[in-house]
């Protein structure tokens, strides 16, 4: 029995993988063997394969249009297969170790335009006062300070300085940062603190979780997502509204208005500015307009187009 078939049988018999998963391994390994056959150098000699061979395979798959995820899956299948050969057939090394698929295209985050954000943040008119105040404070804080969902739900009352308009945030890697609060967000937080005291009179006024559930416990991320989704369905139908969309919108609108990438990086709590740079692609039409107005070559090109 060929090594590949022995390997697949082992996966099904001993690893108890589903037939569908095993078939996926078969397709990925066949893809490599089909590519090897195009080189017309004879059967695969596994003991002579090198990382260079695997990188050539990755390059060929990428060139023919295969996506980064598909290539990564094929490499994972090959790595597992070569580990099997090391254990069962005395293969000395795994040629796929350290070989990585090409980096996939980075998806641009979805943002909401300013008009949509204004509509979304328009306060509700009906409902329990404490619940309306809490939700309004949450939504305003998301957009005012660009917080992550995990950062927002972990806030305590003492983290918000409503007098100076600052909030102390603990981000990824337990890194702390201070970010400003906008005027509207401060007003919303003041209103919520008053309602919080009325609704939960036994809760300490100056400490404890900032946002509370109906049971007086720290509000969960899932509850925030559900409340924002419901608001989005009512105020921005057809738009996918979620906490990160508000963070993305904050970053995009701030960058468009200020052009200060470093400042936006600090506000978002990004360790690497390359993470923040993705937002520079969101307003390309705005940047093109600035270029057309300011760059001498652009002005000349426009005049040339007007010539008969």
Image: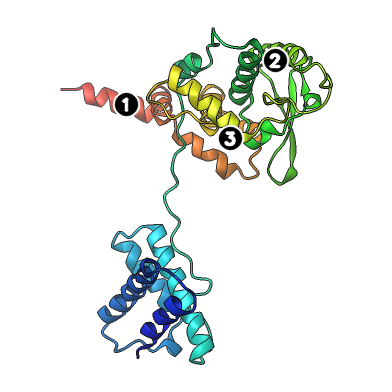
Instruction: Determine whether the residue tagged by mark 3 lies in a helix, strand or loop.
Output: helix
Q: In the rendered view, does 240 fall on the left or right side of 36?
A: right
On the image, numbered disc 1 is attached to which residue? Answer: 300
- Badge 3: residue crowd in 10 Å (few <14, some 14–19, many ≥20): few
Instruction: Choose between 296 and 261: the one closer to the eye.
Output: 261
Place of residue 84 in the rendered image (x, y in percent of width and height, measured from the top left)? 49, 83
Q: Quadrant of residue 194?
A: top right
What residue is shown at x 50% (from left), y 21% (from top)?
231
Residue drawn 53% across the image and 21% down it: 257
The C terminus sits in image quarter: top left
Select label 1 or label 3 by which is in front.
Answer: 3
User: In this picture, is 86 found above or below 227?
Assistant: below
- Whether tag 2 and tag 1 are in contact, CB under 8 A, the answer is no
Q: Residue furthest front?
A: 215
Task: Look at mark 2 in the image and give the residue it sits on.
Answer: 192
Give the residue at mark 3.
222
| Label 2 vs label 1, nearer the camera | 2
Where is residue 154, by image quadrant? top right
Furthest residue to the top?
125
From the image, which quarter does the N terminus lie in?
bottom left
Distance from the alpha carbon under mark 1 to that under mark 3: 54 Å
Disc 2 element: helix
């Amino acid at each position: 029995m060929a090594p590949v078939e022995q390997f697949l049988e082992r996966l099904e018999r001993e690893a108890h993988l589903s037939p569908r998963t095993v078939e996926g391994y078969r397709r990925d390994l066949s893809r490599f063997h089909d590519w090897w056959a195009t080189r017309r150098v004879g059967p695969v000699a596994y003991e002579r394969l090198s990382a260079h061979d695997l990188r050539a395979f990755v390059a060929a798959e990428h060139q023919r249009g295969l996506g980064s995820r598909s290539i990564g899956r094929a490499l994972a299948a090959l790595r597992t297969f070569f580990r099997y050969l090391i254990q069962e057939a005395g293969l000395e090394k795994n040629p796929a170790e350290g070989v990585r698929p090409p980096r996939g295209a980075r998806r641009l985050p979805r943002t909401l335009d300013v008009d949509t954000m204004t509509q979304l943040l328009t306060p509700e008119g009906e409902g329990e006062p404490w619940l309306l105040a809490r939700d309004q404070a949450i939504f305003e804080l998301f957009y005012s300070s660009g917080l992550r969902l995990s950062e927002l739900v972990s806030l305590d009352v003492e983290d918000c300085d409503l007098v100076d308009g600052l909030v102390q945030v603990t981000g990824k890697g337990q890194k702390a940062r201070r970010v400003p609060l906008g005027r509207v967000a401060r007003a919303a937080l003041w209103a919520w603190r008053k309602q919080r005291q009325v609704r939960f009179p036994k809760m300490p006024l100056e400490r404890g979780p900032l946002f509370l559930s109906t049971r007086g416990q720290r509000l969960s991320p899932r509850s925030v997502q559900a409340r924002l989704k419901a608001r989005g369905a009512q105020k921005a139908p057809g738009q996918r509204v979620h906490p990160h969309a508000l963070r993305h919108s904050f970053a995009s609108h701030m960058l468009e208005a200020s052009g200060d990438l470093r400042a936006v990086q600090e506000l978002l709590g990004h360790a690497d500015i390359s993470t923040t740079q993705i937002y520079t692609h969101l307003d390309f039409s705005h940047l093109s307009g600035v270029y057309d107005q300011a760059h001498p070559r652009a002005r000349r090109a426009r005049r040339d187009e007007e010539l008969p």
